[in-house]
Amino acid sequence: MKAFTARITRALNLEAKVPVCDNSGAKLIKIFSVKGLKTTKGKFPAAGIGDMVNASIVKGKPGLKGQVVPAIIVRQRKEYRRLNGERIKFEDNAAVILKDEKGNPKGTMIKGAIAKEVAERWPGIAKIASIIV
């Protein structure tokens, strides 16, 4: 995994419900852990753009509800700062569900824009993205 080219503010806490923006069949997921994140004592883990999370499917096609899946956060409402001074924020929070831990997406298309930081870090998601901001 590459390092980020921005100072990402982690905006999505544990138990956050995030809409899914791909065509994998899931509509809403609930985050229950963030992969590779270390925090200090007493701080709750949180996820930001480009983070891999473990989530359970809350709403979607029959048979998917309750499944535990890995996902990547591709949009967040809370603004973050890029190294060139720009501040970026999106209209909504969104995630993409993965097939495996290597970063291959389950769906074949992504609705809406994704952040440039996600495209740099996860090339499998960048291939199926329609707009990269």
Image (cartoon, rainbow, N blue to C red):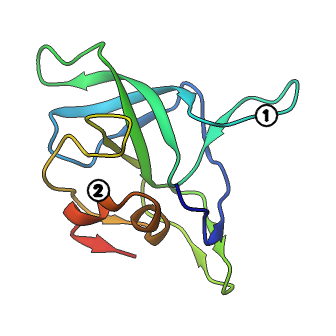
Q: Is residue 93 visible?
A: no
Say which element carries label 1: loop
Q: Position of residue 85 (x, y in %)?
A: 69, 85
**Count of numbered labels shown in the rendering:** 2
Q: Mark 2 — residue? A: 124
Quadrant including the C terminus? bottom left
Q: Tell me the amino acid under the disc marked 1.
A: Thr
Q: Residues within 10 Å of mark 1 (few under 14, many from 20)?
A: few
Q: Residues within 10 Å of mark 2 (few under 14, many from 20)?
A: some
Q: Tell me the amino acid under the disc marked 2.
A: Gly
Q: Which mark's residue is nearer the viewer, 1 or 2?
A: 2
Q: Is residue 65 above or below residue 38?
A: above
- Tell me whether circle 1 and circle 2 mark residues in contact (CB < 8 Å): no
Residue 127 as seen in the image, left or right of residue 52:
left
Residue 58 as seen in the image, left or right of residue 40:
left
Q: Position of residue 8 (x, y in %)?
A: 65, 60
Q: Is residue 21 above or below residue 81?
A: above
Q: Earlier in the sequence, mark 1 or mark 2?
A: 1
Q: Position of residue 53 (x, y in %)?
A: 49, 35
Residue at 86 percent of width and 24 percent of height: 42
Q: Mark 1 — residue? A: 39
